[in-house]
Image (cartoon, grey):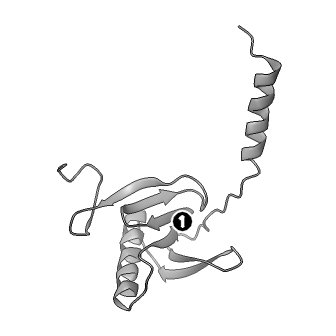
Amino acid sequence: MRPSIVALSLIAATVSLTGCEKQTKAPFEAGVCMHVIEQKDGTLKFNPVARNVPSLELCAAELEGARLRFVRLGSPSREMTGAYQGKFIFLQKEGIYLGDTYEGARFMSLVRTGDGRLAVPGAMPSQ
């Protein structure tokens, strides 16, 4: 069975369109955990939060601590974005997600427990 010309044209068009999407990558600075702020013009500003951070998980913990301090100071925002060695870290209500690009897919890393702590997905018993 041969694919039709129309089907091949659709596949080619889809592949070419995905190449045009904006793909913002995080900077790669070894051991530097950053807070990411989206500016009014759509660009991203990267502010160092901690240096000599040995792992992505510890960077996420640093960002979670910063997020909690902002909330205690009265910040209306309950979500935060960070970056660590070329990866984006998204702290959201449900947990922490990771992504290779700012606009792209996000993958669950840690989930929030009932009392707000973070845990590895599947570590908590289902209710």
Residue sitting at x 74%, y 31%: 11
Location of residue 40 by image quarter: bottom right
Q: Is residue 2 above or below residue 74?
A: above
Outermost residue on the top side: it is 1
Q: Is residue 3 above or below residue 8?
A: above
Q: In the image, residue 92 lies at what x, y percent?
A: 41, 66
Amino acid type at mark 1: Gln
Nearest the camera: 50 or 22?
A: 22
Residue sitting at x 65%, y 79%: 39
- Assign a secondary structure to mark 1: loop
Location of residue 24 by image quarter: bottom right
Viewport quadrant of the N terminus? top right
Location of residue 115 by image quarter: bottom left
Q: In the image, residue 27 lies at what x, y percent?
A: 62, 68
Nearest the camera: 115 or 119?
A: 115
Q: Is residue 106 left or right of residue 113?
A: right
Q: In the image, residue 25 lies at what x, y percent?
A: 64, 62
The residue to which callout 1 is attached is 85
Nearest the camera: 60 or 90?
A: 90
Residue sitting at x 54%, y 52%: 105
Q: Is residue 25 left or right of residue 124?
A: right
